[in-house]
Amino acid sequence: MKRIGILGIGKYVPLNIVTNHDLEKLVDTTDEWIQTRTGISERRIAESDITTTDMAYYSAVEAIEKAGIKPEDVGLIIVATATAESAFPSVSSTVQDRLGAMNAAAFDLSAACTGFIYGMTTAQQFLLTGMYKYALVIGAEKLSNIINWEDRNTCVLFGDGAGAVVLGPAKGKGILSSDLGSDGSGGKHLDSEPTITMNGREVFKFAVRQLPVTVCNSLEKAGIKKEEVDFLVPHQANIRIIDYAREKLGLEKDKVSVTVNKYGNTSAASIPLSLYEEIENKKINKDDIVVLVGFGGGLTWGAITLQWDY
C-alpha cells in the first residue's frame, strides 16, 4: 500500500524568552501559580519586526533542506495558523514566493490548535491521489499579537513559534491512519475576537475527555493497540491535560512529549515543535509507532498514527 511519511522537519522559535517572573511584573500572578496549574515556566515571544510569515518561512527552509529536496519540487504548501498578518495574501502564498516554490499550490488552514493535524491529513490526501509528490505543512503562530497582556488567566499560557514538515512517499511506513472531529457548539469557550478569551474549566473538561478518544480512534483505524504505542506527541496546552491523557492511555512518562514548560501553548505550531525536539533528543527512533494528537478552538480535535521512518 502506498504510504505518505515525514521526510524532513524544521522549526523556528523567537530568541526572546519571557519567564514567569517577567510576567509577575505585568499581572497579578506568580511563578508557582503558573507552574502548578499549567507546567509552563517560560515562553518565546516574537520581536515586533518578526511576523507569522517570517517564522513559517524559517521553519520551512530547514524542513526542505532536511528532506533533501528543492523548493521547486514542492507541489503543495499548507500553513495552519490563526494569526496571519492579513486575510490575503495568505501566509502560505507569501512563504511560497520567498522559498521560490514556483510549482506549488498554497493555502492557509484554520483549525486553531488542531491545525497542524488537519493540515497533515489534508496534504496526505493530495499525495495519495498522486496529484502532488511532495507537500510542505507548516504550523505557525504569533499569538502574542492577540493576547490581552492584562488578563492573567490567558497571557501566561501562550507563546510564538513555527514548525514545518515535508511529506512525501514513504517505503511501507509513514502515516497509518488519522481521526478528525469538531464540535462547534463548544466554540464559545475559546474565542479570539479581538483577543484570546477562554473558559478554562470547560476547555479542560473537553480536552481530557476528547484527547484519549481521538487517539484510540486513530489507533483502531490503524489496527494498533495502545500497548504498541512507542511515543505520543500531544498538543502542548497544559501539563495536567497531558498527564491525564498519558494515564488514561497507560503510557509511561518517558513515552510522552512535554515541551509546554519552555514554549507554552503555541497553538498550530505546538505539535511540530514538540516533534522536532523529540527527534533531536532521540526519543523517537526508526520503526517506532508515534501518535500526534491535537485539540483546541472550534472546538476541534484530531490524531495521526504513523510508523517512524525519518
Image: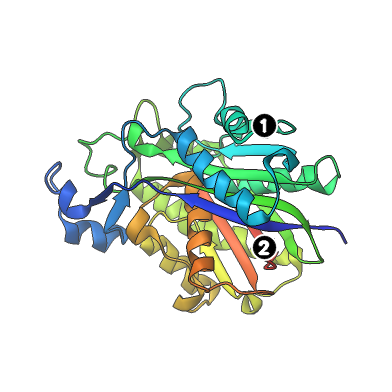
Residue ID at (69%, 48%): 121
Q: How many marks?
A: 2
Q: Is residue 29 left or right of residue 97?
A: left
For the residue carrying disc 1, how many other residues have a C-alpha within 10 Å: few (<14), some (14-19), or many (20+)? Answer: many
Answer left or right for 31 relative to 221: left
Q: Which residue is mark 1?
A: 106
Q: Earlier in the sequence, mark 1 or mark 2?
A: 1
Residue in the image at 52% along x and 76% along y? 251
At label 2, counting other C-alpha atoms closer than 10 Å, the crowd grade (few under 14, some 14-19, many 20 or more) is many
In the rendered view, tell whether residue 92 sits above or below residue 122: above
Residue located beneath label 2 in the image: 305
In this view, the residue in front, 180 or 268, is 268
219 lies left or right of 233 = right
Task: Residue 260 in the image: state x and y as whole percent.
Answer: 38, 58
Instruction: Examine the rendered structure and indicate whether residue 132 appears above or below residue 166.
Output: above
The picture quadrant where one finds residue 304 is: bottom right
Viewer-proximal residue among 101 and 190 = 101
Q: Position of residue 190 (x, y in %)?
A: 42, 39
Give the residue type that dot 1 points to.
Ala
- What's the residue type where badge 2 is placed? Thr
Mark 1 or 2, closer to the camera: 1
Question: Is 78 placed above or below 177 here?
Answer: above
Q: Residue 75 in the image: x percent, y percent?
A: 75, 38
Helix, strand or loop at label 2? It is strand
Q: CA distance from mark 1 to mark 2?
A: 25 Å
